[in-house]
Image (cartoon, rainbow, N blue to C red):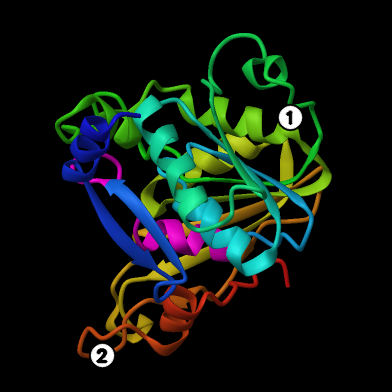
Amino acid sequence: MTDADVTKAELETSDDDFLSGQIKCLQPRNGFRAGVDTVMLAAACPATEGERVLELGCGPGVAALCLTSRTGAHVLGVEIEDESIDLARRNAERNDLADVVKFIRADVTAKGSTLEALGLEPESCDHAIANPPFLTEGEATPPPGDVRARAFSGPADLLAAWVKCATRMVKPGGTLTFVHRADKLADLLAALEGRAGGAKIFPLWPAPRSTGKAATRVLVQATKGSRAPLEILPGLELHGRGGLIADKAWDVLRKGREINISG
């Protein structure tokens, strides 16, 4: 990369702190940007040191880096956008995590096994995480720009393709963890049917539950090969009264604490 390329990249990105500055990541100013959903997803993965985690749609690598910094797990991030992969690799290097976090460009929805062609064997990962596009094409007007639009919505079979890929790459007994829109929960559960069971639904409440405000996001974790029944867990309140970040949410977002969905 030339000096001119670096200058252009810096003008088009912001340098953001996560986990109270433990992780610093460049993100596109006008593309997909990681936020609360991303950190919560990383906090919910039950990986331990040395285990292998696959992240689909890794963007600039924020979830992978937050997860690795907390657990010591090895993460492979997969992303279709070249610009995002470039940023993710730079972010891994600047956080001194390039030895345990790798990023590759691949289309997980392509026919045939793109990941296998790149050397990733089926059932070689202990866990998988993803923040898939929430909507199908035509449901709503996507944000401007190809990258943001692709992160926002996709074809009707896109979610099922993501789940299929994640399940194929995870070992029996391994977990699949997703963050998704609450009003699209049925679609995600349908995609998991017959592939992973024992789904646990963990709502992310925007305000105290006593206010009656509905959860707009959910974390969903299922286990490959499990036949356990579905569970709905109490979840996590993101804000207290007055709009301040709730203590437990603060611990996750700022201190890097885990969200224990597995129990």
Which residue bears the numbered disc 1? 168
Q: Residue 155 is drawn in which quadrant? A: top left
Which residue bears the numbered disc 2? 241
Viewer-nearest of discs 1 and 2: 1
User: Residue 191, labelled with which disc?
Assistant: none
Residue 199 belongs to magenta span: no
For label 1, the SS is helix
Precedes in sequence: disc 1 or disc 2: 1
In this picture, is 131 found above or below 82?
below
| Along the viewing direction, whichever of 153 and 76 lies nearer the viewer | 76
Q: CA distance from mark 1 to mark 2?
A: 43 Å
Going by the numbered disc 1, the residue's amino acid type is Arg
The segment highlighted magenta reads: 28-44
**Where residue 118 sits in the image (x, y, percent)?**
67, 19
Residue at the (37%, 86%) spot, across then down: 246
Going by the numbered disc 2, the residue's amino acid type is Arg
